[in-house]
Amino acid sequence: MKIQIKQIKGDIVELVFNPREEDLRVGENLTLRENGSDRGLIVQVIEFRTVSYPSLVQEMLQLVAEDGPAPNPALEPEGLSEKSNLKLAIAKIRKVVQWQQPMAVA
């Protein structure tokens, strides 16, 4: 998964990540580069939030209820444990950058 941009609002970037895969810290600077482009952002992590998936949980419980006996709330739907471990990093844009393509030497 690595780090994925959820949204950009003004000078704030919301990044979704799995803390088991990435170890981000408040104050850390990250370079985000647009796929297939020479444009990017330098951002600084300013806070963390927990990502919740209430609509996903509700949808999964409805599917289980339609296909079989009533779901046991003590049982976790398959695949939910991985999604519930995701976190949201709030970062502030510090600089917009444009990388120069290296010049070919003849």
Image (cartoon, rainbow, N blue to C red):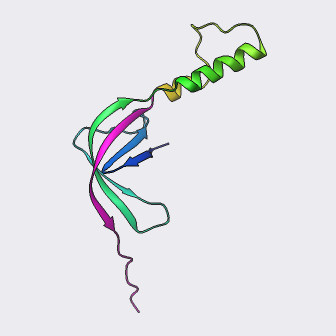
Does residue 62 lie above or below 19 as drawn?
Answer: above
> Residue 59 location in percent, x, y?
64, 23
Location of residue 70 (image quadrant)? top right
Does residue 95 lie above or below 70 as drawn?
Answer: below
Highlighted magenta segment, given as a residue range: 85-106
Residue 65 lies in the magenta-colored region: no
> Residue 2 location in percent, x, y?
45, 44
The quadrant the C terminus occupies is bottom left
Viewer-side residue, 92 vs 22: 92
Q: Is residue 53 left or right of residue 8?
A: right
Residue drawn at 39 percent across, 49 percent down = 8
Residue drawn at 48 percent across, 25 percent down = 84
Location of residue 94 (image quadrant)? bottom left
Does residue 91 lie above or below 57 as drawn?
Answer: below
Residue drawn at 38 percent across, 42 percent down = 14
Viewer-side residue, 29 vs 50: 50
Q: In this view, does 70 lie to the left or right of 89?
A: right
Residue 87 lies in the magenta-colored region: yes
Q: Which residue lies furthest to the front in this view?
A: 10
Residue drawn at 48 percent across, 61 percent down = 35
Q: In this view, does 59 lie to the left or right of 51?
A: right
Viewer-side residue, 50 vs 7: 7
Q: Is residue 67 left or right of residue 52?
A: right
